[in-house]
Amino acid sequence: MNDEILLELHDKVALIRLNRPQVLNALNDALMDQLGAALDKIEADETIGCVVITGSEKAFAAGADISAMATYSYMDAYKGDFITRNWERLKTFRKPVIAAVSGVALGGGCELAMMCDIVFAADNARFGQPEVKLGTIPGAGGTQRLPRAVGKTKAMDLCLTGRLMSADEAERAGLVARIYPADQLLDEAMAAARQVASYSLPVLMMLKESVNRAFEGPLNEGLLFERRTLHASFALADQKEGMAAFVEKRKPNFTNR
Ligand code: HXC
């Protein structure tokens, strides 16, 4: 099996690098399974106090792997519990996680960043939820976490138009905590992680849990609704068309059904 992620331990900090550069770190099952296994290992390791997740300079992650899901039926998505089956480990992970985002964080990539506790961005970073262009919706928390992070109107703007937003805009909107030049991003994220990891681990866990209580109030009902709607989107002709068009590198011809 390929190493879809790379795990490095640096004293009290674990660094996870998403490692599918040939497809801009598109997130497939193998990658998400390996990410989950790495988080299991880190959670069990008492010495680790903080995690940094990063991608390449060009891409944090360009989204869920479109080629892998393009032909999913509704039953593939629903019975297979697409997303929930292996993306939620990050949500249940109890130690602090910093996303260090360089390049694109689109679709599931943006959603993965938003599942982290702190987002640092390189000045070249671009965020977006372009699923509308593929005939589906953000389905890994985007319709719920993005409005909480940036407010309803900007979240609607991003989701309904599919446009990308710059690191500056993301920082102004509250999605991003800090921006650094691309060549300093990882060093700065690791430095912050070392600082976090220098504190009491149970206190960090309590802090994370407490902040998330404020953030996640009615989130779960929204997530469930979103997930089922994502699954239902695989019954649309326009989802088949949108994803097939992407794979075949042509413009989609949507028919509104
Ligand atoms: C599969 C992907 C991919 C993806 C890029 N690639 N994104 N493969 N899934 N999400 C592949 C391309 O097919 C190509 O493979 C290679 O990565 C390089 O990409 P290019 O398009 O050639 O690069 P570039 O011209 O620089 O354009 C970069 C880009 C574009 C703007 C990011 O790749 C793009 O628009 N990607 C899709 C973004 C997207 O729609 N994300 C949302 C996915 S849906 P080859 O083999 O040709 O070299 C989603 C949520 C679904 O995430 C709901 C559940 C979560």
Image: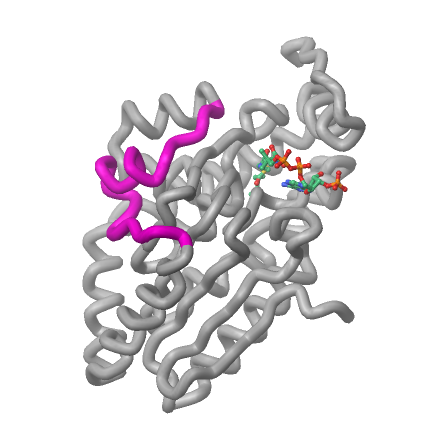
- As drawn, the residue found furthest toward the top would be 255
Q: Which residue is drawn at 38% across and 31% down?
A: 165
Q: Quadrant of ligand 1?
A: top right
Q: Residue at x 24, y 74 (%)?
A: 196
Q: In which quarter of the image is the C terminus?
A: top right
Q: In the rendered view, would you say 157 is above or below 13?
A: above
Q: What stretch is highlighted in magenta?
A: 162-182
User: Could you tell me if residue 139 is visible in this image?
Assistant: no
The reply to whether the magenta stretch includes residue 177 is: yes
Would residue 149 appear left or right of 89 to someone viewing this image? Answer: left
Would residue 99 appear left or right of 68 to someone viewing this image? Answer: left
Question: Could you say which is closer to the camera, residue 56 or residue 161?
Answer: 56
Q: In the rendered view, would you say 3 is above or below 230?
A: below
- Percent position (x, y) of residue 33? 63, 65
Q: In the rendered view, would you say 242 is above or below 66?
A: above
- Percent position (x, y) of residue 180? 31, 52
Where, by quadrant of the figure, is residue 46 drawn? bottom left
Colouring: one colour
Q: In the rendered view, would you say 112 is above or below 231?
A: below
Q: In which quarter of the image is the N terminus?
A: bottom right
Q: Which residue is drawn at 26% across and 58% down?
A: 212
User: Could you tell me if residue 44 is visible in this image?
Assistant: yes
Counting the numbered discs, the total is 0
- Percent position (x, y) of residue 202? 24, 82
Where, by quadrant of the figure, is residue 222 drawn? top left
Q: Residue at x 75, y 20 (%)?
A: 250
The reply to whether the magenta stretch includes residue 76 is: no
Question: Could you say which is closer to the camera, residue 119 or residue 224?
Answer: 119
